[in-house]
Amino acid sequence: MTLPVVGVFLTNEHGKLPVRSTTESACWDLHACITDTTRISVINLYNESHHRLCEQGQLTLYPGERALVPTGCIFDIPTGHSVRLHPRSGLAFKNGITLINSQGIVDSDYVQETFVALINHSGVPFVISHGDRIAQMEVCVVPSTTIALTHQAPQTKTNRVGGFGSTGIES
């Protein structure tokens, strides 16, 4: 079986290839690519947008702030595949730093630098340094599907009754 290959073009000499922590890891770690001349798009708690010039290869993400953190990677994703960006669980649990949209999707026809949209949910500033692992990427097969309008609601397939949360804990 031939494995699909995701090509990675590094946008500068500071970029790092994604790495797997173990041979059994489902995802590849993505690193922040921050230099002293990197300007990062940041949105504060009041929804005000600005660019922040990074110093000493670091970005400080203040409480409630969102930022597009560069990875220095442009992916050449095979047709029929996508890259899914996931939060790093330790970064989220220990520091309150996670992806804004909980999962990012990079389509195979996107050929620009990949940025990771991070948010600081904690009450304290968090420093992201060049080379820090900021997200995980998973290569996924995209099934070929079609959407079709139907004129009849689907019939019940199980004995499920109720809507959102209906299979949760009984009180």
Image (spheres, grey):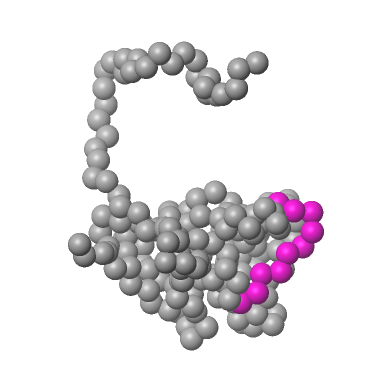
Q: Quadrant of residue 70?
A: bottom right
Q: Give how far across and how far down residue 164 sits, in percent.
A: 52, 23
Location of the N terminus (image quadrant): bottom left
Q: Is residue 48 visible?
A: no
Q: In terms of depth relative to the viewer, which is nearer, 48 or 108? A: 108
In the rendered view, tell whether residue 124 sits above or below residue 51.
above
Q: Position of residue 142 (x, y in %)?
A: 30, 50
For this orientation, the residue located farthest to the left is 1
Q: Is residue 122 left or right of residue 17?
A: right
Q: Position of residue 165 (x, y in %)?
A: 55, 24
Give the vertical position of 16 relative to 81 (above or below): below
104 or 112, which is in the foreground?
A: 104
Residue drawn at the location 40% of the way across and 71% of the way down: 74
Q: Magenta stretch?
A: 120-130
Which residue is painted at 77% across and 62% down in the image?
Answer: 125
- The residue at the point 70 percent across, 80 percent down is 55
- Pick whichever, 145 or 28, lies toward us: 28
Residue 158 shows up from this direction: yes
- Please give the name of the residue rendered at 32% of the width and 64% of the height, measured from the top-left corner: 77
Q: Position of residue 96 (x, y in %)?
A: 69, 54
The quadrant where residue 168 appears: top right
- Asked if residue 51 is positioned above or below residue 36 in the image, the reply reads above
